Image (cartoon, rainbow, N blue to C red):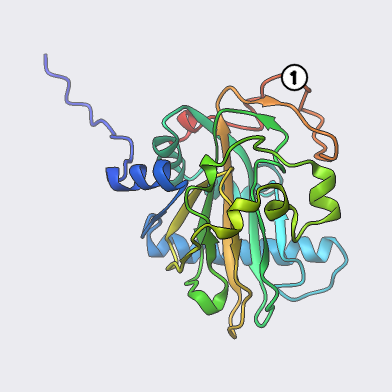
Amino acid sequence: MTDTTPRTTPYTVDEQYVTAFREYGFTHVPGLIPADEVAQWRETALNTIEEDGRRAGMGGGRTALQTTTDPWWKHDSLRDLVRHPRVGAVAEQLAGTPMRVWSGQAYAKRPHDEVPTIWHEDLTLTPLDSPMNVNAWVALVDVPVERGCLIFLPNSHKRPGPHRSEMSEVKNNPTTYMFAQWPELEWYPRVTVPVRAGDVTFHQSLVGHSSWGNVSDETRLAFIISYTGAEAIFQPRPGHNRMDPDLVVGEQLPGHRYPRISDFA
């Protein structure tokens, strides 16, 4: 008897994106999320930021609070975006190893907030031991240069060790620590990546990056999903202050809070 049950095929991207991600440390995948979904997530993210702002006593207004964290368990409305099957599948394909969700944040940068995001790399800030960490930056609106798009230092993930800075350096010298720790990075080429709503950029946690200030009349809105290796160990360093009662130092991340991509992709 022939099995006629429909089967789904995991979403994959063209090999050019995998090559770019591994060679340069980042890649830009256009149109990964369809327009109708983007409109839904844009409204949901704005409402959630506004809700968190009210809870924090910061008054009304959709940019009263610029970020909202951990929505995969604090906000049911954003859980499906954190667990978006296409984004997760691509992250795992790029990484070339099984991955799981680590965190998620909605970011709103207000109109004429012209202060750029400081140059940094994510590994120092991540209290995990894992062979691979990947951040997906999901554009929920068009982000041209004047709206504050991302800037990357290609090949900076290949810099010599040590690959982490001290958290004390980050806190004491947030605007200069990266180039002080790795002075050669200051002379790397810088690649500016404007994106359309629904595009997603992926970068490794070792890659130096920043973003422009928002000199436009519109809010820049993005959602950042962080992934880590499926076997990642929670290993905070001095200065890390992430508080989660489900995390145990020296042990793997609990699956009920930090699901594997294979569970939802």
Query: Could you tell me which quadrant the N terminus lies in?
Result: top left
Label 1, secondary structure: give it.
loop
Residue pictured at 67% horizontal, 83% vertical? 112
Image location (x, y in percent) of residue 192 = 48, 66
Q: Amino acid at mark 1?
A: Gly
Residue pictured at 71% horizontal, 47% vertical? 181
Depth check, front residue: 66 or 129: 129
> Which quarter of the picture shows residue 96?
top left
Query: Can you identify the residue that label 1 sits on?
Result: 250
How many marks overall?
1
Image location (x, y in percent) of residue 167 = 80, 43
Query: Does any portion of residue 86 appear in the rendered image?
Result: no
Depth check, front residue: 9 or 158: 158
Query: Does any portion of residue 204 appear in the rendered image?
Result: yes
Query: Could you tell me which quadrant the C terminus lies in?
Result: top left
Depth check, front residue: 32 or 179: 179
Q: Is residue 159 left or right of residue 118?
A: left
